[in-house]
Image (cartoon, grey):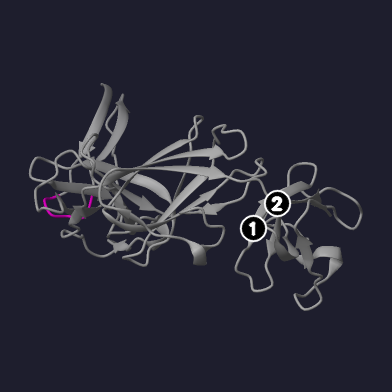
Amino acid sequence: AGTYLVRAEPPAGARLDVARQAVTLDADRALDLALPQRARIAGAVRDDAGAAVERASICAHRAGVEIACARSAADGGYALRVAPGVYRLEAEGPPGARLVGQWAFDRVDSGDADPLDVRDADVGDADLVLARGLVLECTIRAARDGRPIERAQVCTKALAAPLPFACERTAADGTYRALRAPGRYWVWVVPPDREPLLAQWYDRADEGVRATALDLRTDSSVEVALEPGPRITGHLRTAAGVPVAGAKVCADTPFATGRICRETDAAGAYSITTRPETYVLNVEPPEGSDLVASYHAGKRTWAEAEVYAANVQLRT
């Protein structure tokens, strides 16, 4: 008689996991144990010179949720035990190794990662190659008074591969540090919503077509001074006059090449800082609401929308 922890192990090679259950015995009894299904994702991590990478972090994600993580061994090998399903792998180099993290395989964004299907069979060849990176350091300031800009987005996009922009926020002192593989990059800086400053492309361009690619061959430092620009400000309300929070108010150029969107606050207020140009204003209602998207002044289509010139501060 007493309380016990009963442990059941599956036979070798089975796609099953260990089962554990506590049981209190004060008489003879029968106990049924269910062995949960398990799958295995394994491979090796190496750098771009072919050397094994020890203590790299590899995590399996399903539906955006981190399920399991492991560290690579001295030979670069790793293994993850997960429930059968479809996963995406995220890999990071060990601290101080200056290896560029990735979503398998060679992606910078989880949405572009290759899925690994272990519903019916294990995956044993999920090998990863982490490239040695260079440090790109940026300092973002306001051009007029030189103050640092916190929470500005610094976005980089490699010219060599069809990858999306990878964006991070600046710290309180306006600095940003990123580890990137050697190559040529577009660099785009977007100020936070509260700052009446213009977005800027490297090097001091207000449009992407005028941008210059940054050639990252060594550790590099870039200073960016953001200029003020004209603002479009106003409030978003329902037909009954109720403020609408969490909607997006967007300013589009006539050819939809310069879209700037800002979210409304709890009072329905918004503010868009953008370069001098002519714009069409449209509203995307909050997700899940019963409101209908529309253009400024209640217009329902692009053809009906009015065009506004933003060369001075506008209030709408």
Q: Which residue is mark 1?
A: 260
Image quadrant where residue 137 sits: top left
> As drawn, which residue projects farthest toward the bottom?
303
Query: What residue span does the magenta drawing correspond to?
Result: 11-16
Question: Could you say whether the residue bearing mark 1 is in a helix, strand or loop?
Answer: strand
Q: Of label 1 and label 2, which has the lower sequence position?
A: 1
- Taken as a whole, is the magenta stretch helix, strand or loop? loop
- Which residue is rendered at x = 80% and y = 72% of the image? 305
Vertical relation: 136 (above or below) 40: above
Question: Could you say whether the residue bearing mark 2 is in a helix, strand or loop?
Answer: strand
Q: Is residue 91 left or right of residue 254?
A: left
Image quarter hosting the N terminus: top left
Q: Which residue is mark 2?
A: 272
Q: Determine contact: label 1, label 2, CB under 8 Å.
A: yes
Where is residue 228? Give x, y as percent: 65, 45
Residue type at mark 2: give it: Ile
Q: Is residue 293 left or right of residue 45?
A: right
Nearer-the-camera pick, 6 or 212:
212
Where is residue 111? Give x, y as percent: 42, 60
Nearer-the-camera pick, 199 or 68:
199
Residue 33 seen in the figure: no
161 inside magenta stretch: no
Neighbourhood count class around disc 1 (C-alpha, 10 Å): few under 14, some 14–19, many 20 upward: some
Residue 285 seen in the figure: yes
Nearer-the-camera pick, 248 or 55:
248
As measured in the structure, the alpha-carbon distance from the residue carrying label 1 to the one carrying label 2 is: 7 Å
